[in-house]
Amino acid sequence: MYFDEAEIYVQSGRGGDGMVHFHREKYRPRGGPDGGDGGRGGDVILVVNPTKNTLFDFRHKSQYIADDGRPGGPNNMTGKSAKDLVVEVPPGTLVFDAETGDLLGDLVEDGQELVVAKGGRGGRGNQHFATSRNQTPRMAERGEPEESKTLRLELKMIADVGIVGVPNAGKSSLLAVVSNAKPKIADYPFTTLTPNLGVAKLDVDTILVLADIPGLIEGAHQGVGLGFSFLRHIQRTRVLIHMLDGLSEDPLSDFSQINSEMALFDEKIVEKPQIVAYNKMDLPDVQERWPEVEQALTKLGFEVIPLSTVTHENIQKLMWRAAALLDEAPEPQPVEVMPVYRAEEDPRAFEIEHTQEGWVVRGVAIERAAAMTYWEHRESVRRFQRLMDTIGVDDALREAGIEEGDTVYVGEYALEWQD
């Protein structure tokens, strides 16, 4: 289903390259280094937009790539930083790392932001590498590489009141009566295939946000009838209106079945305040059965209100009762994002693998350094060689048996070994 689940690829911008440049001015033939720094790459940021209520837009676009920072210029000019890429999501969006399954954020508040891919910093220009011993450094840094990941988005609608029940019980009809929502309504099961939101204004100070949850059937907690996708939307609601179809062969059995499915999915759902709405009271057969249904549900401790979405009988009474229960219900809490503790990795750590093509060196620091090296400048190459020696890569390669002329691969770069 595209309305409440999506998978997207995000990639931040790479930092701009620093510049190797020396000041040039008439009568100053030996100007110092003035290569500017590169600009910062753009972040990818998820932002809550309250006007959105589905993840359907991600069906048409699933890749979000921020711009790179601009390179530095002469005269110590810093390159322009890229704009952050803002991706709008509806309130109630859970953000997971698709690879690890970690929960990265629960976005519920209007305007709430989550940086999901951080832009690379700009590389330093040669102005930063001048020393008393080397006043004309011909070296600089390329921009820091981008960050990328695949995200899984999951939507749990945020509504004050959830309307639940079996298919064709009249949930969409109730939402249409009490709000300006225009859900699809027809006399057959599963007319509603996506949850609908509506706003009911009872008076100046009392406004309810309602969610019409598509009909649940037996086995919904296991995904039968798309129930698994729909049940999650009930989790954020604070009050439930349970619609009973007065024309059903056994309304009490329907009631028990729906509550069982909700409890099997999440036992906290059935702890929410619940009003039972016995629908279709405009029909004689339904009126005749009403005393029996009322007595049975009242004994179980549930409040039951007979109504008709056709004649609007007791609709206002139902809404005001829901509003009263809402005032008493606790405020919903966002899903807690638990920090994931893993063994700390030394960024300077590396590993070496001998393949048919040559020697492959893998490691966070060494691969990032290779990506930020100007290989066309000797001083930059020597700086990288010093780093290889400092963190122990050279010694490790010698111990592993590397020979003169062998190829060493670091990230995307192939180097020839010379001892």
Image (cartoon, rainbow, N blue to C red):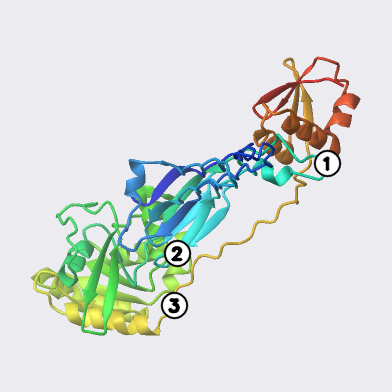
Q: Which is more toward the observer, 27 or 419?
A: 27
**At x 25% / y 57%, what residue is drawn?**
167
The residue indicated by pointer 2 is 112
Q: Earlier in the sequence, mark 1 or mark 3?
A: 1
Give the distance between the C-alpha atoms of the residues marked 2 and 1, in whole angstroms: 50 Å
Q: Position of residue 122 (x, y in %)?
A: 59, 45
Q: Position of residue 35 (x, y in %)?
A: 62, 41
- Vertical position of residue 95 compared to residue 367: above or below: below
The residue indicated by pointer 3 is 331
In the rendered image, the residue lying farthest to the front is 27
- Vertical position of residue 412 compared to residue 14: above or below: above
| Structural crowding at the residue carrying mark 2, measured as other residues with C-alpha within 10 Å and reported as few (<14), some (14–19) or many (≥20) | some
Q: Earlier in the sequence, mark 3 or mark 2?
A: 2
Give the distance between the C-alpha atoms of the residues marked 3 and 2, in whole angstroms: 18 Å
Q: Position of residue 216 (x, y in %)?
A: 32, 57
| Structural crowding at the residue carrying mark 1, measured as other residues with C-alpha within 10 Å and reported as few (<14), some (14–19) or many (≥20) | few
Inspect the image, locate mark 2, and give the three-letter code of the amino acid beneath it: Gln
In screen coordinates, is 238 left or right of 278?
right
**Which label is found at residue 133?**
1
Q: Which is more toward the observer, 316 or 374?
A: 374
In the rendered image, the residue lying farthest to the right is 399
**Residue 396, picture quadrant:** top right
